[in-house]
Amino acid sequence: MTILAFLAALLAFGCLALSMERHHRDIVHKHPSRSKRRGLRIAGWMGLTLSFILAIAAWGAAIGGILWFGLLSLAATITLLAVNRLSASHRGAPPSRSGRKQAQESKA
């Protein structure tokens, strides 16, 4: 159940990231419609709720709540790295070096 809670949180954060216009445009190369953004946002929040329920069911209220925050942290970090990598790969530059390189070139 813990793995299911983690996967639900990961999918939820993916939906929440794609509900943002910039991330959706960078990854999918299209502007999302208003209804699509709303649907992704609702799916994201439902996924987080499901993740919480699964964590509580697996470990009880006290430990499950603490575990859930840890799972959220891990899922959010993985989502952040994935969105960053996917956005940068579509732009054609590595994510960590492009900003530094442009800043150094503009100073020179």
Image (cartoon, rainbow, N blue to C red):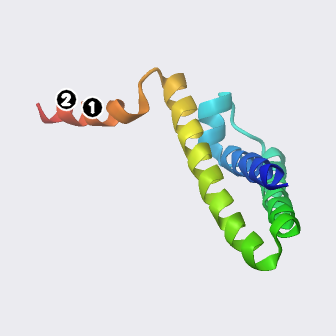
Which residue, given by chain and number where applicable, does mark 2 sit on? 105
Percent x, y of residue 15: 75, 47
Residue type, mark 1 in image: Gln
Percent x, y of residue 104: 19, 33
State which quarter of the image contains the N terminus.
bottom right
Percent x, y of residue 56: 83, 70
- Position of 31 relative to 42 (above/below): above
State which quarter of the image contains the C terminus.
top left
Residue at the farthest left position: 108
Residue 99 versus residue 54: which sits nearer the camera?
54
- Location of residue 62 (image quadrant): bottom right
Residue 55 versus residue 84: which sits nearer the camera?
55
Percent x, y of residue 79: 62, 44
Which residue lies at the image location 27% right of the left edge and 31% below the top edge? 102
Q: Check disc 1: other Cα within 10 Å, few if <14, some if 14-19, many if 20+.
A: few
Secondary structure of residue under mark 2? helix
Mark 2 → mark 1, Cα distance in angstroms = 5 Å
Which residue, given by chain and number where applicable, does mark 1 sit on? 102
Tell me if 42 is positioned left or right of 18 in this view. Answer: right
- Location of residue 81 (image quadrant): top right
Which residue lies at the image location 63% right of the left edge and 62% below the top edge? 70
Q: Which mark is residue 62?
A: none
Which residue lies at the image location 42% right of the left edge and 33% below the top edge? 95
Residue 49 versus residue 55: which sits nearer the camera?
55
Secondary structure of residue under mark 1? helix
Tell me if 94 is positioned left or right of 48 in this view. Answer: left
Residue type, mark 2 in image: Glu
Do labels 2 and 1 touch, CB within 8 Å?
Answer: yes
Q: Check disc 2: other Cα within 10 Å, few if <14, some if 14-19, many if 20+.
A: few
Which residue lies at the image location 49% right of the left edge and 24% below the top edge? 91
Residue at the farthest top position: 92
- Location of residue 86 (image quadrant): top right
